[in-house]
Every structure is written in structure tokens, then in C-alpha cells.
Image: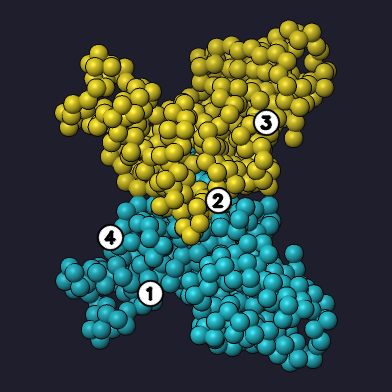
Chain colours: A cyan, B yellow
Amino acid sequence: MYLVGIDLGGTEIKGGLFTTDGEAIQKSSVKTPVVEGFDGVCNAINGLINSLVNEAGLDRKDIKAVGVGIPGICDGEGLVYSAVNLYWENVPLGKKLRELTGLDIYVENDATIAAIGEAAVGTMKTAKNAVFITLGTGVGGGIIINGQPYSGSHGLGSELGHMIIGENYYNCNCGSNGCLETFASATALIKYTQKLIKDENRDSIILEKVQGDLEKLNAKIIFDSAKEGDEVASLAVKRLVKYLSIGIANIINLLDPEIIAIGGGLSKAGDYLIDLIKNEVDKYVFYKKEKIRCQLLIAELENDAGIIGAAMFARI
Amino acid sequence: MYLVGIDLGGTEIKGGLFTTDGEAIQKSSVKTPVVEGFDGVCNAINGLINSLVNEAGLDRKDIKAVGVGIPGICDGEGLVYSAVNLYWENVPLGKKLRELTGLDIYVENDATIAAIGEAAVGTMKTAKNAVFITLGTGVGGGIIINGQPYSGSHGLGSELGHMIIGENYYNCNCGSNGCLETFASATALIKYTQKLIKDENRDSIILEKVQGDLEKLNAKIIFDSAKEGDEVASLAVKRLVKYLSIGIANIINLLDPEIIAIGGGLSKAGDYLIDLIKNEVDKYVFYKKEKIRCQLLIAELENDAGIIGAAMFARI
């Protein structure tokens, strides 16, 4: 028997066909037809499952189950409460896909799905309790407790990005002020760097790198410039590291996991980022007597985390 | 068979003998001989267990197990890493008590123990996932996940009081700045009220109530004065409510429990406090579309939470 993992994003739907051990047999993707609404997206997912099965020379009855990671929040039956990028509110994704495909369908938040992938075959696989943090456009999270994904009593948990950890100079999209996401996402890093250069008129090698067009700024340029000793970039990275470390320490003080794995675009900064965070997290952890026992690591699965995690979620 | 619950505090050791259903048979307490050190305190606990058993006309062999709640952090074997009020660091409480008593001994953090009590026979008993917050001299917490107490991979979790949620005008005892404890404990409430009156020279009915001696100030006076419309007291309560609500929203965004129960000294403010928090928490919860589904309640067990919880912990 085989498993299908679907990673439903705002621009692309990725799909993978896996053995029950997580070995990839076939991968494919299609554009997300957001404008065709809920039904259009469901049809696209159904079509993607079909093509994965056909290309592998299999039949639908060879598929044990399908896992779907969504950019939003949902209950255990796959009722999606909200998925902002898809303009969805209270849509019965699980039910609809069961009808269309005739298959067992399991739906979860995409960051929780990535956590499941990392726990099954990635960097968190030795841990009983672990947390995955994704640092990209936003900040998301997935929690593993006693080896199982945990998203709370109503599927609303593990929203690490909206943990309030201070006051910030702009509000979060969610309406609150001071969310981790507004300090520690790639968006936040870029925004703050732009602010330093524009509002405070500071000089920086960054301006040269983006040919004077700050709209071209990205996280890689900022990290590279910080490594080269640029003051503005260093300030921006330092601020991100401070608040990310507060967020991580809060998670350690609450959940005391063995491993926290960092994924998403910013994780490409790799050991440079991890080393900066480690020193800072030590300051904010409650039990300071020994070096913190929680390991901070860069996630392993990168782009495939979504499809592997979804397939592994369907295995449960 | 019977269970013994021990609530080890910095000033008093409370003990209770219970049926396995949590019915109290006998209660007693002794002063904590802190100056006699680790051995003295262990002997006092052993003596308390003896007197509970004797007074109930029972024998040690009628005791199935003993649970001990400690004001500190420990591992699963009862090795206490740290208990500041007792001046303990890395003491083998579980091992020592097993030797002294010849009984099965289970040691846990006192706030986790109170959570176990509330989950077993108190206000959280219907919940699969629930969090207990104690607001007293400090802020502590206990987490129940899938019906079981959760204190992390190394016993260092559920330290809600040291979640960093903003910047404060004074540092926490733990060395960090902005811990929930420094905004939402009784100590924080009193300290901020004193600051408003002393540093800002504000007039308040509080001054009359404490006969001009701000050292006599307590949380009850502040809450009562706020209810009477006193401006200083209202400001202090409002600040506490704001930050406590941020802390609670952070817990909801992370753990999405069915119930959060509030205990400790400040919980005596009852529905007045709960109503203020409910309105404020709604502002900071990520999923705002419906009323938050997590119930906020005042804990039920009050002073006996420690001994009941410890006995129920030993039942597991």
C-alpha cells in the first residue's frame, strides 16, 4: 500500500506518492487555481492525486490514505476554519475530497504537517517531544508531544507566530501587536532593514547590492551583509535573533522539548543563525544552571517537508 | 489501599491521606524545618506520613503510594534540580524518601500537582487538554495534555510565569525582563500600585485603607478599591489584566486547551477577575472569528489542591 502527501499552498499544490516507510515514488505539482474557489482547488487536488497514481502505474485502490497540509487552521475532520491566502472560511475540505476521491483523507495545518515530517524522517526523529518553527513570510509552528502531532482541543494550537513577546512598531496581520511573526519572519527582517535605511538614512552596503531599490531586498542579502560586517544588517539580524530567542525560550519554558527544529526560508542562514540563537536563548530560559538541554537544529527536509509530512500524517 | 499527598511549601508541609477516589480521610501539617536542611525536611515529611497513617488507624502497608508537590523543578525520579525557597539544588528527594519510608514516592512541581488535582476532581475534570495557572507571590503553571500531566522532556516545562511577554520596569527574580510573573502575580500588582502612589504621588483611597503604610498593601485591598472606582487601583488592575490576558492568549495560541483554570491568591477576586480577562483575551487570540472556545474558570480546590493533586499524582 502507498500514501499520498499533498502540500496545498497559495501558489502551488505539491503532491508526492510514498511507500508507508516514507520513500518517495513519484512527485508532481500544479498551480493552485485560487480564483476557481473551493471547488476548483478540490478538483485540482483530485487531478494531482490521479496523475501521481497513474504515473506510478498504480491504481487508486493501492492508496491507503491521503494527507493534506493546508495554509490555515482546521478541525480533526478537515473542516477548514480559515485559510487566508486561499480566501477560505469554514469550508469542508476533508469531506469534499473524500467524496471526490473515494479515499481516506486527513487534513492538518501545514506547519504541523512539516513537524510530522521532521519527526518521522527528519531532524526531530529521535525526539519524544519536539517543536518545529518555520520562519518565512510568516512564522508558523508544529508541536510533537509524546511522539504525536499536537494541535490542541479544537485544532487552533501551535500558532507560535502569534505569541506576543513585546511591543513592535507595526501591527501583525492578525490585528495584535508584538506577535513573534512581526519580529522573526523574513518579512519582519526585511521591513526593519528597510526602515533603518529609509527612515534613519543610514548607510549600508545593502543599497549597492540592491542597486538602490529596497524593494529588491531579501533575507539572504541581509544575512550576507551582516556576515560581511555591515552595521545596518547586523542591527537587523541582532534584533531578529533577540526576539526569536525570546520566542524559543518561551517555548522551552512551556514545553521543554528535546529538539526545536527551524525551517522555512530563513533557515537557509544555517549554522550562522543557530549559533547566534543558542547564545541568546540561554539568557531567557528559566532554568539557567546548566546549558539548556533542548537542541536547536536546522530542519532537514526543506521543500519536501510538506509532502513527506502529509504522507506520514496519513500513515497515522 | 490509600494514597498520601504531600504539599511541600517554604513555610509549611501539608499532608493528606486519601482513598484512591480522592476522598479525604485525614489531614495534617507541620512547619517546614528549612534550617535543618534537606535531611531535616525529609525527616519531617516521613514523620508527617507516619502521623497521618497512625491517626487514621492504618498501617504503612495500607499505603499504595505517596505523591509530593515541591516548590521547584525536578526530574521523573524525584531529583530536585532547584527549589529556591528551600535552598535546594540537585537533591535526591525521591530516592531519600523511598529509603526513609519504604514507600513508592512520586515527586512533581507544585503547580503541576495542583493541575493534576483540578483535572482529577476539580474544575478541569471534563477537559482532555487543560492548563492551570496559579497567581500568587509568583506565577506558576501546570499543563494537562491528553488527560496526563505534562512537564516536558526533562521536567523543566510548564514554567508559564517565566514566559516573556513585554518589557517591564523591573527584572524578574530569574534574571530576565518581562516575565509574566512580573506583570501578573500578586507581588507585581502590589509593587505597581505602590509605584503609582509613591513615585507618581497619586491620591488614592488605598492610602486610607493601609493607614498610610504602603507595606500593609495586599491584593485584596487593590481589587476592592478598583471595584469602588479608585483610579490608582483601577490602573493597576487594568495593567495586570492586560498582561495576564496576553499570557493566557499565548497559551491558547500554543496549546488550545478546553479549560484554563486560575488558582492562587489572586483567584479570590473570582468572577470580577474572570470577566475582565475574558474580554481582554479575545483581543489577543489568533483565531478571533468566533468567541474563544477555551473556558476561563476559577480553580475549585483552593488550599487543598496541593495535597489532593499529590495523592492523585501518586495514583497514576
Q: Report which residue position mark 4 lands on.
A: A169
- The location of residue B190, given as percent across then percent down, is 33, 28
Disc 3 element = helix
Q: Mark 1 or mark 3, which is nearer to you? A: 3
The label on residue A57 is none
Quarter of the rendering containing residue B22: top right
Upstream in sequence: badge 1 or badge 4: 4
Q: Are marks 1 and 2 in contact (CB under 8 Å)?
A: no
Label 2 and label 3: CA atoms lie apart by 22 Å
Question: Label 1's element?
Answer: helix
**Of tags 4 and 2, which is closer to the observer?**
2
Disc 4 residue crowd, few under 14, some 14–19, many 20+, Cα 10 Å: few
Do callouts 3 and 4 point to residues on the same chain? no
Q: Which amino acid does label 3 sit on?
A: Val
**Which of these two is toward me, A14 or A124?**
A14
Of mark 2 and mark 3, the one earlier in the sequence is 3
The picture places residue B292, in percent across and down from the top left corner, at: 51, 51
Q: How crowded is mark 3: few (under 14 residues within 10 Å), some or many (20 or more)?
A: some
Residue for badge 1: A219
Nearer-the-camera pick, B115 or A212: B115
Residue B244 appearing in the image: yes
Which residue is tagged 3? B121
Q: Alpha-carbon distance for marks 1 and 2?
A: 37 Å
Task: Give me the residue at 31% from left, 17% from top.
Answer: B216
Residue A229 at x, y percent in the picture: 29, 70
